[in-house]
Image (cartoon, rainbow, N blue to C red):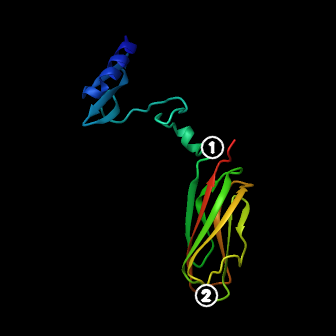
Amino acid sequence: MALGLIVDGLKNFGNNLTSLVATSGVGFTLRSLADVGEVRTLDNSTYAILRGATPLADNDFATKGYVDDGPPTGVVRPLAINVGTTTGSSVTVVQAGRALTQLSVNITTAYSVGATIAVSCGGVVLAAAGAINAQVLGVSVLEILRPATANGPLTVTVAGAPGVGACTAYVEYSTPLQ
């Protein structure tokens, strides 16, 4: 009986109907209101949790596990961090084995004379100290294609105790093509 309600509810979901799916007082409601679909508890007090399989097609919903595992093979993801006069690291960690493809550093406020910046990500030094001139405003772009050797954040190391200076570092990474 419950399966019939589910099928009928899904058939009518797009017709602004509220369908009830319940067995022994436990269940959820499927609602379509103003072109927005909802899955709610029977008493309509909260959203209901749905579980599903790992998505396969472009229009499948993504499960939490699928999203937590990171992008599918070959998808490029950007990661950025703003840094001032002290070393900073991203909250996001790039997993070992991901392909690091490009580094861009935008010096937005020139650093004090003698200051250097170095950039690393996932256990790989992307720009050693002095490779990017921290005293010159502008963007430096380094094309790279190296795998991350360890799980790790994007880190900009500032040395030389500058009184002023700021930059934004961007790294692009993806999973290697299989």
On screen, 157 above or below 74?
Answer: below
Image quarter in which the N terminus is found: top left
Cα distance in 3D space between marks 1 and 2? 41 Å
Marks 1 and 2 close (CB-CB < 8 Å): no
Residue closer to the observer: 152 or 70: 70
User: Residue at (35%, 20%) from the top-left corner?
Assistant: 21
Residue 122 figure quarter: bottom right
Report whether 111 appears left or right of 62.
Answer: right
Q: Residue furthest right?
A: 149
Q: Is residue 25 visible?
A: no
Image quarter in which the C terminus is found: top right
User: Residue at (71%, 51%) from the top-left corner?
Assistant: 96
Q: Residues within 10 Å of mark 1 (few under 14, many from 20)?
A: few
Q: Is residue 91 visible?
A: yes
Amino acid at the residue labelled 2: Ser
Q: Residue furthest top?
A: 1
- List x then y, in percent, for residue 48: 39, 32
Residue behind mark 2: 112
Residue behind mark 1: 73
Residue 149 figure quarter: bottom right
On screen, 174 above or below 159?
Answer: above
User: Residue at (25%, 25%) from the top-left corner?
Assistant: 17
Amino acid at the residue labelled 1: Thr
